[in-house]
Image (cartoon, helix red, strand yellow):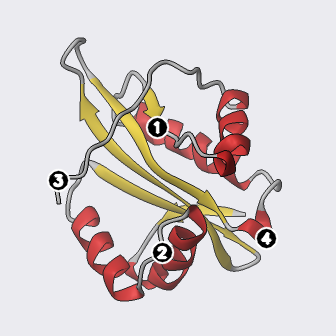
Amino acid sequence: MEIRKATVSDIGELTLLMDQLGYPTTPEKMKLRFCNIEANSDYNTLVASYDGNVVGMIGLVKGYYYELDGSYVRIVALVVNINYRSKGIGKKLVQEAENWSRKIGASGIGLNSGNRTERINAHEFYKNMGFIEKSIGYAKSLI
């Protein structure tokens, strides 16, 4: 398994992974999103390659605390292809996210995960990786 920075040549696989995460899209839309994200140095997108295929991704963004000094990283997307789960790929992606976070001087890392039945295994995974439940999230559409 290899973890590396995502490139525009990974758009096909990223599109499939977003679909498996529950957010269907097209390669054209995914390419536009990816290019916008990659143009901002506070973002980092990593992919996991297994047997030569991109089978996982993690999207990260650096933020700054209002209530504390310093910065943090949020995991804004994490998915492993359904056919490659339970092989340590998600764990390795999170470890690499933590490494990047430390490298850029972040003092914490966090994420939000939906309260849907299909996310129960993900919640257990996060707990096993040392994350703790700390807040309730809210969202509101503006369109």
Judge depth for marks 1 and 3 and give the one in front.
3
The residue that disc 4 covers is 83
Relative horizontal placement of residue 52, taking residue 38 as reference (left or right)? right
Q: Pick the residue in front: 25 or 44.
A: 25
Residue 108: image location, x then y, percent: 42, 24
| Amino acid at circle 3 | Leu
Which comes sooner in the sequence, label 2 or label 3?
2
Which structural element holds mark 1?
loop
| Amino acid at circle 1 | Asn
Badge 2 density bin: few <14, some 14–19, many ≥20, Cα 10 Å: few
Which structural element holds mark 2?
loop
Residue 68: image location, x then y, percent: 24, 12
Q: CA distance from mark 1 to mark 3?
A: 19 Å
Which structural element holds mark 3?
loop
**Residues at circles 1 and 3 in contact by the CB criterion of under 8 Å:** no
Q: Who's the residue at 22% across and 12% down the image?
A: 67
Query: Residue 112 has which mark?
Result: 1
26 w.r.t. 66: above or below? below
Which comes sooner in the sequence, label 4 or label 3?
4
